């Protein structure tokens, strides 16, 4: 039985590939790549002629069996467009399928935007929470950010350049004016780290066109944040509770789900919140 190798590839600078990664890419029977064009460019640069097949979000069903069949007789290397496969890409499903059939799965570590941005951010690195790509739609993004607003650990997220300004606005609205490091084009020629407050970042990227791939490293919730939220709870009168319930239900939440969320945010009893919304609807 073959081995499934998860091979990290450079996120920009080609010198960041490891000697072990190069050896594995030469020795395996097949390379399963999220982006075959970038994979061919990478392998060609290092003089590697291993066959390549595509394996991306919309090809998982059709390609999964071929990869598993290849593993019966030889080894397969999985690579993403850049960085470590399995993080925010379809490699996870393949790993699960290989493990289910008792194939050996081996990581080949290397370059990664998540840890690169984190360690250079200037924010705490002893504990952190990786949340992947932020939701694309504004309402979904705000709801998601609100769901992690109480997280005390450093937050790390990926974002696309055309959404970075909107995301910074939503972060300011839901998480407050925390410390943030906005890292872009890591290891590439135009690598940049912006370190400051969320509002500072909003001002900076309002004046500078966002280009490249972004990694956001955001300060976790502090004791000062908790005190501010406690102070805000006195403003949760009946009218505000009712309005919040109406807004959440208009966004598709059930009355029970909305009552639970409003109760958590306001500090009021969930049954009381639920009853207030019922009274208003009547």
Image (cartoon, rainbow, N blue to C red):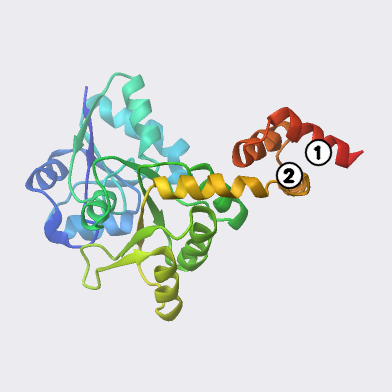
Relative to 76, residue 155 above or below: below
In x, y percent, where is residue 91?
A: 35, 39
In the figure, is residue 242 to the left or right of 6?
right
Choose between 116 and 218: the one closer to the eye. 218
Query: What residue did someone put label 2 on?
Result: 241
In the figure, is residue 251 to the left or right of 49?
right
Residue drawn where x is 58% and y is 47% of the image = 143
Tell me whether circle 1 and circle 2 mark residues in contact (CB < 8 Å). yes
Q: Earlier in the sequence, mark 1 or mark 2?
A: 2
In x, y percent, where is residue 47?
A: 11, 56
Q: Which residue is outermost to the right?
A: 282
Residue drawn where x is 70% and y is 39% of the image = 253
Relative to 212, residue 221 above or below: above
Q: Which mark is residue 277?
A: 1
Relative to 138, residue 238 above or below: above
Within 10 Å of the Cα at label 2, are there few (<14), some (14-19), or many (20+) other Cα atoms?
Answer: many
Q: Which mark is residue 259?
A: none
Choose between 11 and 177: the one closer to the eye. 177
SS for dot 1: helix
Q: Label 1, label 2: how many angstroms apart (C-alpha)? A: 8 Å
* Res 43 quadrant in image: bottom left
Within 10 Å of the Cα at label 1, are there few (<14), some (14-19), or many (20+) other Cα atoms?
Answer: many
Quarter of the C terminus within the rendering? top right
């Amino acid at each position: 039985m073959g081995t499934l190798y998860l091979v990290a590839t450079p996120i920009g600078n080609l010198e960041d590939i490891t000697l072990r990664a190069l050896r594995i890419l030469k020795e395996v029977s097949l390379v399963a790549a999220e982006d075959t064009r970038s994979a061919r460019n990478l392998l060609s640069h290092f003089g590697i002629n291993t066959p390549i097949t595509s394996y991306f979000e919309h090809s998982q069903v059709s390609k999964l069996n071929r990869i598993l069949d290849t593993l019966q007789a030889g080894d397969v290397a999985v690579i993403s467009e850049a960085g470590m496969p399995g993080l925010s890409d379809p490699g996870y499903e393949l790993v699960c399928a290989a493990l289910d059939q008792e194939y050996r799965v081996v990581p080949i570590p290397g370059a990664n935007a998540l840890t690169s941005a984190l360690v250079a951010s200037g924010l705490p690195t002893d504990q952190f929470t990786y949340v992947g790509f932020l939701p694309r739609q504004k309402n979904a993004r705000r709801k998601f950010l609100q769901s992690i607003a109480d997280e005390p650990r450093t937050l790390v997220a990926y974002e696309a350049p055309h959404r970075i300004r909107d995301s910074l606005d939503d972060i300011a609205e839901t998480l407050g004016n925390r410390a943030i490091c906005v890292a872009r084009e890591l290891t590439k020629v135009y690598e940049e780290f912006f370190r400051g407050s969320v509002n500072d970042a909003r001002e900076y990227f309002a004046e500078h066109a966002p280009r490249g791939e972004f990694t956001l490293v955001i300060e976790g919730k502090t004791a000062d944040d908790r005190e501010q939220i406690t102070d805000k709870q006195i403003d949760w009168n009946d009218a505000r509770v009712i309005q919040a319930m109406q807004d959440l239900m208009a966004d598709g939440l059930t009355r029970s789900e909305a009552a639970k969320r409003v109760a958590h945010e306001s500090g009021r009893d969930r049954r009381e919140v639920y009853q207030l919304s019922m009274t208003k609807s009547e």
